[in-house]
């Protein structure tokens, strides 16, 4: 009973701080491109390690492997991606238990903990997939990303202008497996609600335009 109570309390605390994070697929490429292109020069530099051009961003998005890797996104009410993360699994069999993490957040959405939550979401999935080591390569000046890594307990090694963070992951357990299932289900539900709300608002706008047109026509005809 004590373990069950602790598990329940852990879930409750987690869901009180819940942010809907959805797994993205190839159908989201255009939204991902829009999000990354919206980043300013400095943010592009911190995310990719170089001042990526629009063309380089398009090449990056086109090469995303949604089958091998996991890409996560946070959507606003307009169904625009405001934050995303890329969990890339190693293609080298010798490093099959390793994965690399990268994240980007819209400027207007900073300070809300989105980067940290995306990292936590990626960690849970990596654990459940048998990953033992999470790796982050970042510019040393990318203090928000390195702060997230250090807070999670990662070992950070600096080499001049670049830094590498290594986080050892525990094996999957009931908590990580159940939490991932709940995360996926709730995020899908949140997306569906936002999608229905957007469709409803579009319908209302259409009806308002029709009514406005009818009123204008009546006014002009003197009816």
Image: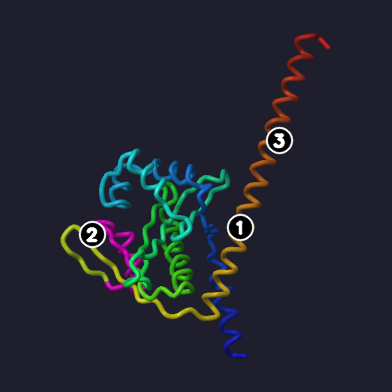
Of the 4 image quadrants, the one containing the N terminus is bottom right
Q: Residue at x 37, y 71 (%)?
A: 96
Looking at this rendering, what residue extends furthest in the front direction?
Answer: 93
Q: Quadrant of residue 12?
A: bottom right
Q: Earlier in the sequence, mark 1 or mark 3?
A: 1
Residue under label 2: 140
Q: Quadrant of residue 208?
A: top right
Q: Regarding mark 1 in the picture, which secondary structure is present there?
A: helix
Q: Position of residue 109 (x, y in %)?
A: 44, 50
Residue under label 3: 204
Neighbor class of circle 1 (other Cα within 10 Å; few <14, some 14-19, many 20+) is: some
Looking at this rendering, what residue extends furthest in the bottom direction?
Answer: 1
Residue 178 left/right relative to 66: right
Q: Which span is picked out in magenta? A: 135-155
Q: Regarding mark 3 in the picture, which secondary structure is present there?
A: helix
- Tally the numbered discs: 3
From the viewer's perspective, is residue 212 above or below residue 135? above
From the viewer's perspective, is residue 186 above or below residue 206? below
Q: Position of residue 185 (x, y in %)?
A: 62, 63
Numbered label attached to residue 188: 1
Q: Nearer the viewer, residue 110 or 96?
A: 96
Residue 217 left/right relative to 63: right
């Amino acid at each position: 009973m004590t373990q069950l109570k602790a598990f329940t309390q852990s879930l409750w605390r987690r869901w009180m701080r819940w942010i809907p994070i959805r797994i993205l697929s190839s159908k989201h490429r255009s939204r991902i491109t829009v999000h990354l292109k919206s980043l300013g020069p400095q943010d592009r530099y911190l995310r990719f390690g170089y001042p990526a051009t629009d063309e380089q961003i398009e090449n990056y998005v086109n090469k995303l492997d949604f089958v091998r890797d996991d890409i996560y996104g946070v959507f606003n009410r307009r169904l625009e991606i405001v934050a995303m993360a890329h969990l890339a699994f190693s293609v080298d069999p010798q490093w099959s238990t390793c994965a690399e993490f990268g994240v980007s957040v819209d400027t207007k959405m900073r300070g809300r903990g989105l980067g940290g939550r995306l990292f936590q979401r990626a960690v849970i999935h990596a654990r459940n997939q048998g990953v033992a080591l999470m790796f982050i390569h970042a510019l040393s000046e990318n203090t928000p990303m390195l702060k997230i890594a250090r807070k999670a307990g990662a070992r950070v090694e600096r080499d001049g202008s670049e830094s590498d963070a290594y986080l050892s992951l525990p094996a999957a357990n009931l908590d990580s497996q159940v939490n991932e299932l709940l995360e996926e289900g709730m995020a899908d539900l949140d997306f569906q609600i936002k999608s229905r709300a957007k469709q409803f608002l579009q319908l209302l706008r259409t009806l308002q335009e029709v009514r406005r047109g009818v009123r204008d026509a009546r006014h002009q005809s003197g009816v």
